[in-house]
Image: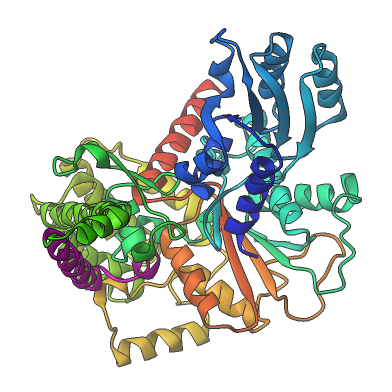
Amino acid sequence: MVVVSAARDYINRMLLDISGMKVLILDSQTVSIVSVAYSQSELLQKEVFLVEMIDTISKSKESMTHLKAVCFLRPTSENIQYLRRQLANPRFGEYHLFFSNMLKDTQIHLLADSDEQEVVQQVQEFYADFVALDPYHFSLNLPSNHMYMLPAVIDPSGLQHFCDRVVDGIAALFLALKRRPAIRYQRTSDVAKRIAHESAKLMYQKESGLFDFRRGELSPLLLIIDRRDDPVTPLLNQWTYQAMVHELIGIQDNKVDLRGIAKASKDQQEVVLSSEQDAFFKLNMHENFGDIGMNIKRMVDDFQQVAKSNQNIQTIEDMAKFVENYPEYRKMHGNVSKHVTLVTEMSKIVEERKLMLVSQTEQELACNGGQGAAFEAVTNLLYNESVSDIDRLRLVMLYALRYEKESPVQLMQLFNKLASRTAKYKPGLVQFLLKQAGVDKRTGDLFGTRDFLNIARNMARGLKGVENVYTQHQPLLFQTMENIIKGRLRDVDYPFVGNHFQQGRPQDVIIFIVGGTTYEESRSVALQNAVHTGVRFTLGGSVVLNSKRFIRDLEEAQRIAKSSTNAV
């Protein structure tokens, strides 16, 4: 179930079957879907000479009848309206309409009525309604991701819109993979339960014909869980390459914006970090920061050897060889400077924000006991002038999640210290986090302190020592995957929807996290899949989080919750 190939196959089919010069028309969401699966040079090879956005295309009146329009859009009512305007005054010779999900009959009739000049050649559903970031990791890039934290009564239509988009994304994924899953969800989460039931209703009732693939093999498992069951992972600093770039600089649709970085050259204002397009990144994306430095040094040395041999041009043959190899040389040069720029910038941030110091305490809070020592360590860092506001906030949040029941008095002291040091963060945000994701709300054994097996495992890890103090934390997802492999995921905590149970152990499991995934979790999935246990995992979520985004969602949800109680 490699999600990248599923998305690429659809785009290939769209572009290959239509010969001649093309314009690709996208919307704000399908532009992400296409950009992670296809590079610009690949689009050019398929004779796509122009990429336009559906909402701005109507503004231009210039006729281009020599181009064929390939439209790849989400089937929203806005997009249908934009298309109707386009078809009333067509700018292009032909229109080939591809929708990323199921069209309603009424929408098809509207389009047919608008096509008076008969320029539409075909209308198809191509189910690439998800952003395939890595082979086993996808996102839905939901803008209003904070919705999952709000009770349904606060904004019923907003929450319905959020759930509809998640159900659409999940349905498209299974249509692309031509499978219908058995569905389980986290019992303590209302939003996970709602999405699970709505997905089942769509797949087994409303569109059961579409999902009936009549395949003999075991159904895959779709497990829907809530981000709030593990609020620790998105709050931690990261020390493996892909996760660290996202935490410290930010990755959006496999691209990194380097405009704010002084050292970035003109042609590297935005760089692509994709395991599909960059061999060095593919090999190193899950390596820790120390090893990355060594590997980049090796890459720089190799490049210098190539550069040296290129300086030694003495004959016509040498010149011809250089010209022939020049594109490869330029690509290598761009790749080396990209990774050097990223690692240099991250080293600078680590030094400025004293992240090695901060992260050591974070990892202790996430992985080991010892409340007294933890309180002292957090207090010292709150008073350290070099520690940034966001790092102070994260430390208090991690302490609160760990010790909310054990030391309420000291927790209050930390709240007061945080408020006095960091005016920027409104008091109450840490309390709001506990209300959302405190111990009473969680299903899993987040700190390995409830279940005897987990306590024993933690003690064993403590005795053996950890290879790297900065990467000792394992996301709760790791435990969930282990439980699935061993058949230990309890029905009482993760019930099935309806009577579609699973016989035996599933071979394919899609875990969807409502509220967003992290790159630390996608690394866990990649490492788990590399072990070949007979179960293959794919991870998906509403967005990809780093600590900034997770805190921003918390703030937004808190603001809305506050204003709605004030209104009452």
Q: Nearer the viewer, residue 143 or 357?
A: 143
Color scheme of the displayed model: rainbow
58, 342: nearer the viewer: 58
- Span highlighted in magenta in the image: 282-311
Q: Is residue 33 above or below residue 399?
A: above
Determine the image quadrant of residue 110: top right
- Please name the residue shown 69% across and 39% down the image: 100
564 left or right of 287 in image: right
191 lies above or below 461: above
Relative horizontal placement of residue 405, taking residue 490 as reference (left or right):
left
Left or right, 239 with respect to 119, comes to: left
| Residue drawn at point x = 31 percent, y = 92 percent | 464
Give the image location of residue 499, x and y in percent: 87, 64
Give the left or right position of residue 510, taking residue 340 as reference: right
- Write the residue at 50% across / 47% down: 36
Which residue is outermost to the front? Answer: 316
Q: Nearer the viewer, residue 404 or 241?
A: 241
Q: Residue at x 72, y 43 (%)?
A: 126
- Can see residue 528? yes
Q: Quadrant of the N terminus?
A: bottom right
Above or below 519: residue 53: above
Which residue is the extreme one toward the left? 385
Give residue 112's position: percent from left, percent from top: 84, 20
Inspect this view and state whether residue 232 appears: no
